[in-house]
Image: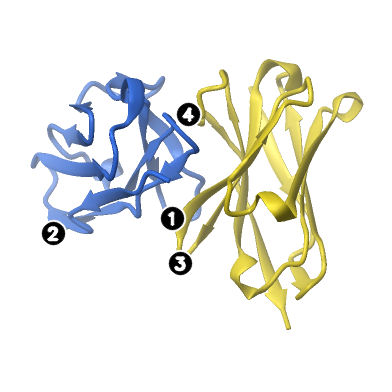
Amino acid sequence: EIVLTQSPGILSLSPGERATLSCTASQTVSNNYLSWYQQKPGQAPRLLIYNGSNRATGFPDRFSASGSGTDFTLTISRLEPEDFAVYYCQQYGSSPTFGRGTKVEIK
Amino acid sequence: QVHLQESGPALVKASETLSLTCNVSGVSISKYYWSWIRKTPGRGLEWIAYIYFTGSTSYNPSLKSRVTMSTNMSKNQFSLTLKSVTAADSAMYYCAGSETWLMSFDLWGQGTMVSVSS
């Protein structure tokens, strides 16, 4: 199985700052079949990014993602109050697996 | 608007079978691939299995021997059966949907918490 390692575990930032989240795979993720999800307390995860860099419906363009092979990045250009949440990466190039998440918290 | 709602017991005894159902409204279950995903403090998010309305299934290798999925077209539902549960199966269980066989999940239920008691 492909193990996804997310870093950092916790990111403490202020509104307006830039957030950079990393997801590293133990093996190459085929075709960049990698998604990012946002999860807020008491809610289900919500698809944010699919196929490595495509933004899902409803998310603004301050969210962007890139990467290929084993290294992927999610960037939030300027944090808004509603962006503070936990973000998970997930690969689906093989049997789906998830990372353990990065919590973006208010500094 | 598409809505997924999980239902099932909140408490299951160890060694017994857990059965969960996901009721889908707003879209025919024939339009998506349907999965179960669980979340625990120890293991995080874990994909369990998927099913397509044709009956095609795929299972997480680590759970394959204990898992069965099925669909009920007339009720627009799909279900999960997990046999021989242990405390390690205590989790928040989510039903989820992906528009293609590529398991990127754009539909999620709110989740149902299941605890396994000894």
Residue B42, x across and y down, in percent? 45, 68
Type of amino acid at the residue the image marks with label 1: Pro
On screen, B17 above or below A20? Answer: below
Tell me, yes or no, whether the two marked residues, 4 and 2, touch with CB atoms within 8 Å.
no
Type of amino acid at the residue the image marks with label 2: Lys
**Secondary structure of the residue carrying numbered label 3:** loop
Type of amino acid at the residue the image marks with label 3: Pro
On screen, A103 above or below B117? Answer: above
Give the chain letter at badge 3: B
Q: Please give the name of the residue rendered at 24% of the width and 43% of the height, measured from the top-left corner.
A: A23
Q: Nearer the viewer, residue A30 or A9?
A: A30
In the picture of the structure, the residue carrying the numbered disc 1 is: A41
Q: Are marks 3 and 2 on the same chain?
A: no
Give the chain letter at badge 1: A
Mark closer to the chain start, 4 or 3: 3
On screen, A49 above or below B10? Answer: above
Q: Quadrant of the C terminus of chain B?
A: bottom right
Chain in yellow on the image: B
Q: Are marks 4 and 2 on the same chain?
A: no
Tell me, yes or no, whether the two marked residues, 4 and 1, touch with CB atoms within 8 Å.
no
Q: Which mark is residue B41?
A: 3
In the rendered image, is residue B90 in sight? no
Q: Please give the name of the residue rendered at 58% of the width and 54% of the height, measured from the top-left corner.
A: B62
Q: Are marks 1 and 2 on the same chain?
A: yes
**Secondary structure of the residue carrying numbered label 1:** loop
On screen, A36 above or below B19? Answer: above
Q: Which mark is residue B104?
A: 4
Q: CA distance from mark 4 to mark 1?
A: 21 Å
Q: Give the left or right position of residue B88, taking residue B67 as reference.
A: left
Type of amino acid at the residue the image marks with label 4: Ser
Q: Residues within 10 Å of mark 3 (few under 14, many from 20)?
A: few
Q: Nearer the viewer, mark 1 or mark 3?
A: 3
